[in-house]
Amino acid sequence: MMGQAVGIAAALAAAKKVDVRELEPAEVRAIVLARGAQLDV
C-alpha cells in the first residue's frame, strides 16, 4: 500500500502544481482509504 499512497501523492501534487511536501497528509490518506486500502493493522 505504501507504493500506492506515494503514487497518489505524486499525482495529486502534479494536479495541484505543488511540491508533494505541501500536500495535507489527511487528504492523501482519505483518497487511499477511499480506494479500499487498509492502513491500520
Image: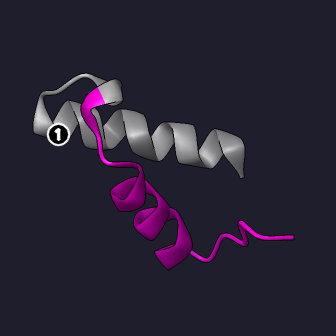
Residue with the mark numbered 1:
15
Q: Is residue 17 magenta?
A: no
For disc 1, the neighbor class at 10 Å (few under 14, some 14 to 19, many from 20) is few
Q: Is residue 1 left or right of residue 33?
A: right
Residue closer to the observer: 20 or 10: 20
Name the residue located 77 percent from the left edge and 70 percent from the top edge. 40
Instruction: Determine the image quadrant of residue 26.
Output: bottom left
x and y percentages locating residue 10 in the rendered image: 38, 33
Relative height, residue 25 to residue 10 (above, below): below
Q: Is residue 12 left or right of residue 40?
A: left
Q: Quadrant of the C terminus?
A: bottom right
Q: Is residue 28 above or below residue 12?
A: below
Which residue is rendered at x = 28% and y = 43% of the image? 12
Q: Residue at x 25, y 31 (%)?
A: 22
Seen from the viewer's position, the closer of residues 14 and 39 is: 39
- The picture places residue 15, in percent across and down from the top left corner, at 17, 39
Magenta range is 22-41
Amino acid type, label 1: Ala
Question: x and y percent of residue 38 in the render?
Answer: 73, 72
User: Is residue 37 within the magenta segment?
Assistant: yes
State the colouring used for the structure image.
one colour
Q: Residue at x 50, y 39 (%)?
A: 7
From this viewpoint, which residue is outermost toward the top? Answer: 19
**Looking at the image, is 26 positioned above or below residue 24?**
below
Q: Residue furthest left?
A: 17
Percent x, y of residue 11: 33, 39
Say which element carries label 1. helix
In this view, the residue farthest toward the right is 41
